[in-house]
Amino acid sequence: MVVMTSFKPELQVRLLAGLAQLTRLRIVAVVAEAPEPGLPAGDIARAVRCPASTLSFHLKELVQAGVLEVRASGRFMIYQLRRDAFQGLCEFLQVLGGTRPDSRAEPPASGRRKPARSRRAVDSDQLSMFGE
């Protein structure tokens, strides 16, 4: 069993929710490919072909989710990927997927599946809620 507290599940949920939208994924892909200081919002808008108001909304959501960080540089807002957040998310997903051994996870079973539980027949009392 994965010890969820070691992976801060609230943070993982926030990150996944922030990424769960096509435009945001496109934004993240563009920002991830950018060189180190990051990208100004205008460059991101041109790359993803997104209107300024829509882009502003999605950038705000990505910053609040902890996916991107933003800093002012003169009159521009520069956005950069929070690689540390992605590192934690990747580790969390690897443990869940069983692709990364983890000392907090239970060792895998002998490779045999547990026998399936026997299924009970459905009786009329169970169907009464459906009016049958």
Image (tube, helix red, strand yellow):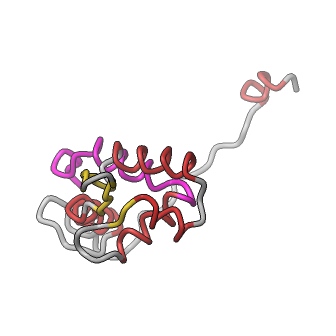
Q: Is 116 in the magenta?
A: no
Residue shown at the point (35%, 46%) measured from the top left = 65
State whether residue 18 appears in this view: yes
Q: Is 9 in the magenta?
A: yes
Q: Is residue 90 above or below residue 122?
A: below
Position of residue 46 measured from the top left corner of the image (x, y, whole percent): 54, 67
Extreme residue in the right direction = 132
Residue shown at the point (29%, 67%) measured from the top left = 38
Q: Nearer the viewer, residue 120 or 15?
A: 15
Q: Nearer the viewer, residue 55 or 23?
A: 55
Corner quadrant of residue 129: top right
**Region rendered in magenta:** 1-23
Q: Is residue 127 above or below residue 62?
A: above
State whether residue 1 appears in this view: no
Residue shown at the point (23%, 68%) measured from the top left = 37
Q: Nearer the viewer, residue 34 or 131?
A: 34
Q: Is residue 101 left or right of residue 12?
A: left
Position of residue 83 measured from the top left corner of the image (x, y, whole percent): 24, 65
Question: Would you say the magenta stretch is mainly helix, strand or loop?
Answer: helix
Q: Is residue 96 left or right of residue 120?
A: left
Extreme residue in the front direction = 74
Position of residue 35 measured from the top left corner of the image (x, y, whole percent): 28, 77
Position of residue 109 measured from the top left corner of the image (x, y, whole percent): 28, 69
Quadrant into which the C terminus falls: top right
Extreme residue in the left direction = 103
Counting every numbered tag in the picture gives 0
Residue shown at the point (82%, 26%) measured from the top left = 130
Quadrant into which the N terminus falls: bottom left
Q: Is residue 18 left or right of residue 107?
A: right
